[in-house]
Amino acid sequence: GQQLNQSPQSMFIQEGEDVSMNCTSSSIFNTWLWYKQDPGEGPVLLIALYKAGELTSNGRLTAQFGITRKDSFLNISASIPSDVGIYFCAGPRYNNNDMRFGAGTRLTVKP
Amino acid sequence: EAQVTQNPRYLITVTGKKLTVTCSQNMNHEYMSWYRQDPGLGLRQIYYSMNVEVTDKGDVPEGYKVSRKEKRNFPLILESPSPNQTSLYFCASSLGDTAYEQYFGPGTRLTVT
């Protein structure tokens, strides 16, 4: 099936550092979504990408939809303690209605 | 406040005892979905619904049932729970009839002994 491979699985960084994570697939996706899950809560949408090559920012977050449509990247600049959580990439499967999620990147930020 | 609510938030039950986890959204969203989250596996979709009386299987539907009789509610039913259904469950909804940009509930942690 269409699997989404996220890397790295976990990251331990110092406050103020920049963070980069990515998501790849063997299949083409028409939409890439990035979610963040805070401890004990449900995921929250951060950024949605709808076009190959698209680069979108949301505050300190920047995400890109890869040109091949098989990958996407999320960057966080100048990390702060509240960036702690699990970041998931996601995309719709063959139709627009069933979603695949990556296994997540767990981010820890040391003050 | 716009939200997705789930009940109960925590449940411990025994193998074979039927249970229902309720999900309700107050945003008039057409699309609703159920996921389970297990360590190292991310979120896997169980069932989704594009509108009232329209439901379809996701990635891992075995052992689960759903119904969508009203737009706002999408209960998840486990007719005969088993220990491998111990997991964290999330309900989500989105505007329109696609899965984009979903709003997630707070989660239900289920333990089946």
Image (spheres, rainbow, N blue to C red):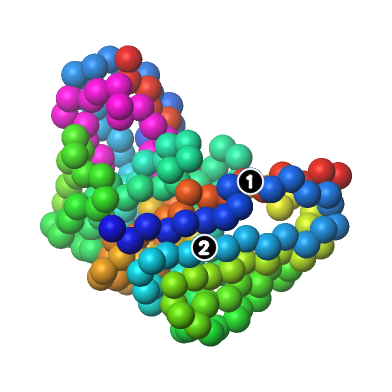
**Residue in the image at 72% along x and 60% along y:** A19
B66 versus A80 height, above or below: above
Q: Residues within 10 Å of mark 1 (few under 14, many from 20)?
A: some
Amino acid at circle 1:
Ser
- Residue B26 in the image, given as x and y percentages of width and height: 38, 56
Image label count: 2
Find the distance from the CA under tag 1 to the CA under tag 2.
13 Å
Residues shaded magenta: B75-90
- Residue A59 in the image, given as x and y percentages of width and height: 71, 70
**In the displayed structure image, the side of residue B25 where residue B50 appears, left or right:** left
Residue toward you, B2 or A53: A53
Which of the chains bears the disc numbered 1?
A
**Residue in the image at 56% along x and 37% along y:** A40
- Residue A44 in the image, given as x and y percentages of width and height: 53, 56
Element at badge 1?
strand
Give the quarter of the image for residue A94: bottom left
Residue A78 lies in the magenta-colored region: no
Element at badge 2?
strand
Judge whether residue A97 can be spotted in this image: yes
**In the displayed structure image, the side of residue B84 where residue B9 appears, left or right:** right
Amino acid at circle 2:
Cys
Give the quarter of the image for residue B99: bottom left
Q: Could you tell which of marks 1 and 2 lies nearer the N-terminus?
A: 1
**Residue in the image at 52% along x and 56% along y:** A6
Q: Which mark is residue A23?
A: 2
Which of the chains bears the disc numbered 2?
A
